[in-house]
Amino acid sequence: MSNLKTLATTLEAKKGFELNMIIGCDGFVDEIIHLVDKRQDYANYTRIPTIAEYGQRISRAAGLSANIEMVTIQTKLGGNGPILSNALLEYGVELVYVGALGAPDIHPVFKPMADKTKAVYSLCNAAGTDALEFEDGKIMMGKHSVLKELTWDAMCSNMGGPTGIAKLVNESHLFGMENWTMIPHMSAIWEGLINDVFPLLDNRPVKPLAFFDLADPEKRTAEDLLKAMKLIGRFEDKFRAILGLNEKEVYQVAEVMGVKTIDAPDAEKLKHAVVETHKRLGIYCLMVHPVRSACCAIGGEYYTIDGPYCEKPLLTTGAGDNLNSGFCLAQALGLDPLASLTLGVATSGFYVRNAKSPTFDEVIEFIRQWDAGKV
């Protein structure tokens, strides 16, 4: 039996699972945008297809000017936390969300998600993103200033203080705090959790999971990034910590952790960065998702799998968060590392083809179709 058939069978047996998770703590209203290359009439146009061609268009305007039309294809919920949560809710996870979904009222784009949660603690208004979509990737143009209101004091004030937060965490199988890069006070929030909440947490026979996603730390200083990595390492006291990164991010983290890039084929270079960075982080798992594959280091072992690559995706914004949802769900269900990576890339593969997160039944069928060579 193939690995894909085995995974589909395993997931069938897991139907009806009961998992509780807490996810935070950002929130964005995303506008998915195409950039017009040539317009035929008021209703028809061709779009700029690649990031390289967009870059050339911008470069040609240097010293002159340019007018580039933006067409909003979709307005949707955004942010690492909400997209991850929405995907987990589609899978049937019981979920509490903490973040920036609107205040005093939740923004309409988050209402369908919020209605499916056990509880929502919205600490401030949502930020915004213009997501420029291309065939070979995306450029996220963010408006983040409101996220400065996401603070440890605000979290405590809205959630019953450290005691209230500890109660929620004690009831959860996974605790996720996403988007460190764009939330100015995230490191301080982590310090508050470590100092004030950790002493109140139960000591369980099997530690729950804690999942972290940095969200492109290039604009943060090396000093800030290194401090964040050390804080994530401290979560190992009470959790099995998972850090999820894309390929660009793993090399950024590797550099601040003192891991030298080797001169080798891409696959070997990536493996070296993942394995050596994982050792230095001292956490349960480092998981990385390049565009065409996914890999992780757990327990001193390295695992990798190619994904069901899609040349013409309907939507790429949120693909990484959907991959994270599949990986996190698999880990919470007790699946092995390779099966967890497979569920991750299958979740992402379904999402980019259908512009929505799969249900549990849909991802099982997608895995079967993948196994049959039909995706």
Image (tube, rainbow, N blue to C red):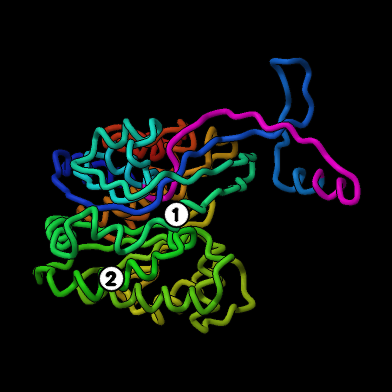
Q: Against 177, is 251 above or below?
A: below
Are circles 2 and 1 on residues that touch, CB within 8 Å? no
Note whether 328 is above or below 117 in the view shown. below
From the viewer's perspective, tell me whether residue 223 is left or right of residue 357.
right
Residue 3 visible in the shown view: no
Distance in Å between CA atoms under marks 2 and 1: 17 Å
Residue depicted at x 44% and y 58%: 148
Q: Quadrant of residue 166?
A: bottom left
Please, is residue 194 above or below residue 356 in the view? below
Mark 2 sits on what residue?
192
Q: Which residue: 61% across, 39% down?
A: 133
Q: Residue 90: within the magenta?
A: no
Q: Check disc 2: other Cα within 10 Å, few if <14, some if 14-19, many if 20+.
A: some
**First reached walking from the N terminus: tag 2 or tag 1:** 1
Highlighted magenta segment, given as a residue range: 57-81
**Amino acid type, callout 1:** Leu
Q: Position of residue 158 (x, y in %)?
A: 24, 53
Camera-side residue of 116 and 13: 116
How many numbered badges does the structure rendering display?
2
